[in-house]
Amino acid sequence: MRVATDIGGTFTDLVCFDYDKKNREVKNVEVSKSSTTPGEFEKGILNAISKIDLDLASIEFFVHGTTVVINAITERKGSKTALITTEGFRDVLEIARGTRPDLYNFNFKKEEPFVERYLRQEVKERINYLGEVITPLEESSVDEHIAMFIKEGVEAIAICFLHGYKNPIHEKKLAAYIRTKYPQFEIITSHEVTREWREYERTSSTVLSAYVKPIATKYLNNLTYHLQKLGYKNSLYIMQSNGGITTIEDVKANPITLIESGPASGMLGAVVLGRTIGKKNLLVLDIGGTTAKCSLIENGVPKIVTTYNIEKTKTQAGFPILTPVIDIVEIGNGGGSIAWLDDGGKMRVGPKSAAANPGPSSYGKGGLNFTTTDANVACNRIHKDYFLGGELKPDFDSLEKAALPLCEELGMSLEEIARGVIRVANSNMINALKSVSVNKGYDPRDFSLVVIGGGGPMHGAYLAEELQIPQVIVPLNAGVFSAFGMLMSDLRRDYIRTNVMDLNADYFSMVKHVFQEMENEAINAYERDAYDKDDIKFEHYLDLRYAGQEHSVKLRLSDLSNLKIDEIEKAFHQLHKKRYAFSLIETKIEIVNYHLVAEVIVNKPVIAKVSPKGILMKDALLASEKVDFDELGIHLSSFFDRDKLEPGMTASGPAIIVEQSTSTVIPPNHQFTIDAHANIIITKTE
């Protein structure tokens, strides 16, 4: 048996199934959903396990995605952290960047750094940009700083030296000294986080990884302990932000790789789904209880970025992190997002969420705010008998009380407020989808829209219509698809090094040498986890730019053993023009970063075709009731049980398809078909 769990801001999802390794078939899929338990996240997982009485002794493979890292950062609940850096550079963290995230927005402000100035201390040492030692390091010079850190209750220490990405000898030396003499601290060095340049971004990444290291280590140790106590005997794997899984020990060494652990798995699941059904160009939208996440997949490959920003808005600079992440745009707009009025009297939805506790007002758990989920309930797009998989009846009294302030302020009925909330939520999601497509040179009409999460299928058809996307795909078990995606992932480690040099055929031997060093590092890391060299698959990328530019684009090398300068130059010009709308054919090209992806392909399931059981369409019909479709009117609509819909079945809207973890809305001017893999395919009718 195989199990995957995904902790979200509102719900914790679990998927498990029997797996026949020989023919890679999946059997007996079970799904479980429980409320997320902030502060003790492992409890949500254990609750989901107990709901279906899962025997962990029979589990061969357990993979987990978690929000513990991003939550600790956004809620400022990490550990007290100190920074040791090169003399003269203690204020890099506070100076940050002078650019505004929104050029003409003068409300911009810098947020307080995660390490206060008195906990940022310097030591004498210096390495130049070539990696040459200019001033040797004296380890004992930090003893005075460490004494102060102990007095102040510091738990974690980040070490980031100037040009440590080029030559980490001083970082290694100081870390070894502190770990030996002061073992009570969690230590992390910048070269363990990234070997990429940019002083502020590198320092920020190291500090944030140190900030979450004690809490992530404690959480992962607790989870491992509880799973073993319940009978699980094998290794626990963790989903990373780069779309791959890795071992517990690997993550504990650098927990910032978990920054987008959960969302990345949904995108990877969509990649596998697309390959299965022959759809390689996908826009993926994952709407959970707290946020909506979207990403673009081109030709079956997700976009990976190595610089990621958290908490960045038009008025906030946010914090950069140098770690490989699937290019995901995330907005505070999920099922639990709260509707409110701004100072101008206009309705907004999110980013604040009712989360798991108390949840939307319709949960009847004391929620006082009107949310997107409440709006869908009010429009009967979520049937009262199938609310939360039929586990709970909507509390309409609480829903009406929560909507009352909005109704009075705007002079509108409950129905009008509900329609407005859904419209605003849809608008927010459309902007997010545009940011990964239109804003980056892609036409949404060339893609299919995959909608997952508890909220995705409820909004997908409306978003596709607005963006003229021809087709919406709702996969089986869409509400817990991120957890399912983890079981489709391979082990992956990324290695990045900065070495700025001209793109010149005379330097290709150096390019190969750098990649060989990185490959050796990857081989050693995997061998520590008992994987053989022959199991590892390598991919090679270069970050290239025009000389004098700030930004770069990532180019995959098809054959490292046979590099051709004209092919690389041509591909770079094309990529740059697609991303930035221009190319400079006569300008010199520079290599900025070397990026190695090292994967171990694991034996994983395929998405198999579903055999019809002879069920008739009328047998899948649950009810016929009126549903509010906003501008399309109120219509008598068919409610179908997804578990009884078989391949080949088709019907026109208006309709609602219900399942345990979500509901799929088919508006009046749309139709749906069940394909051979039991996916719901929604298209617009003429």
Image (cartoon, grey):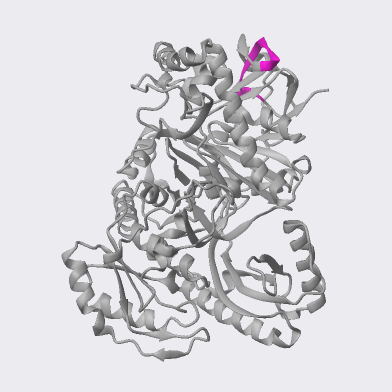
Residue at image location 70% in from the left, 67% down from the top: 555
Task: Answer whether residue 45 is visible to the viewer in this image.
Answer: yes
Q: Nearer the viewer, residue 397 or 242?
A: 397
Is 422 located above or below residue 24 in the figure?
above
On whether residue 644 falls in the magenta region, the answer is yes
Q: Nearer the viewer, residue 287 or 525?
A: 287
Residue at image location 69% in from the left, 76% down from the top: 590
Task: Indicate the quadrant where residue 10 lies.
Answer: top left
Q: Position of residue 190 (x, y in %)?
A: 42, 71
Q: Nearer the viewer, residue 654 or 310?
A: 310
Task: Answer whether residue 249 is visible to the viewer in this image.
Answer: no
Q: Which residues are magenta?
A: 631-645
Tell whether 439 sits left or right of 405: right
Q: Nearer the viewer, residue 242 or 549?
A: 549
On whether residue 554 falls in the magenta region, the answer is no
Q: Position of residue 650 (x, y in %)?
A: 74, 23
